[in-house]
Amino acid sequence: MDSGAIRRGLALGMAVLTASGLLALAVPAEAHAAAPCAGRKVRTLPFSTGAVQVFKQGRRICAVTLAKNPGPKRTMSVSVQVRGHRPVAYKDKRTHRISTPLVHMGHRSVRVKGAVGGGSVSTGWISY
């Protein structure tokens, strides 16, 4: 092999490595912004200062509280409770969103709550 072929091979390898690195950085940020929970969105619960989106994947459920007007940090909370169990709840000062992990619900009803600042929403027992 001559030195020109080696240089071209190294340049091609470096270009592929750079492109794959850029894709690795760009894709997770877009995927996280588009779907904060795994599964499909089954319900949106709007309220005065935001909304709670409920996602379902098989027999598991997840909820995300989104602020209507992202800006300064405010107290945000989200909670998913499977009937007969303690709620999985998160509360923190955030600017945009807060979510729960996937919670196994089996064939039970669930209750979802969310709040941003002074506004809030709560469901009764819902079967999905």
Image: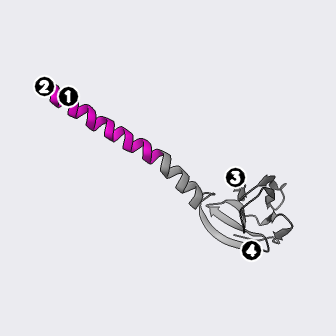
Gap in angstroms between the C-alphas marked 2 and 3? 56 Å
| Coordinates of residue 96 in the picture (x, y in percent) | 71, 59
The residue tagged 1 is 6
> Which circle's residue, 4 or 2, is located before the other in the chain?
2
- Frontmost of labels 1 and 3 is 1
From the viewer's perspective, is residue 26 above or below residue 79? above
Gap in angstroms between the C-alphas marked 1 and 3? 49 Å
In the rendered structure, the answer to whether residue 113 lies left or right of residue 24 reads right
The residue tagged 3 is 101
Mark 2 touching mark 1, by CB under 8 A? yes
Whether residue 96 appears in this view of the structure is yes
Which element type, helix, strand or loop, lies under badge 1? helix
- Asked which quadrant contains residue 58, the reply is bottom right
The residue tagged 4 is 46
Disc 4 residue crowd, few under 14, some 14–19, many 20+, Cα 10 Å: some
The residue tagged 2 is 2
Q: Can residue 19 be found in the magenta stretch?
A: yes
| Residue displayed at 53% across by 50% down | 28
| Residue displayed at 59% across by 61% down | 39
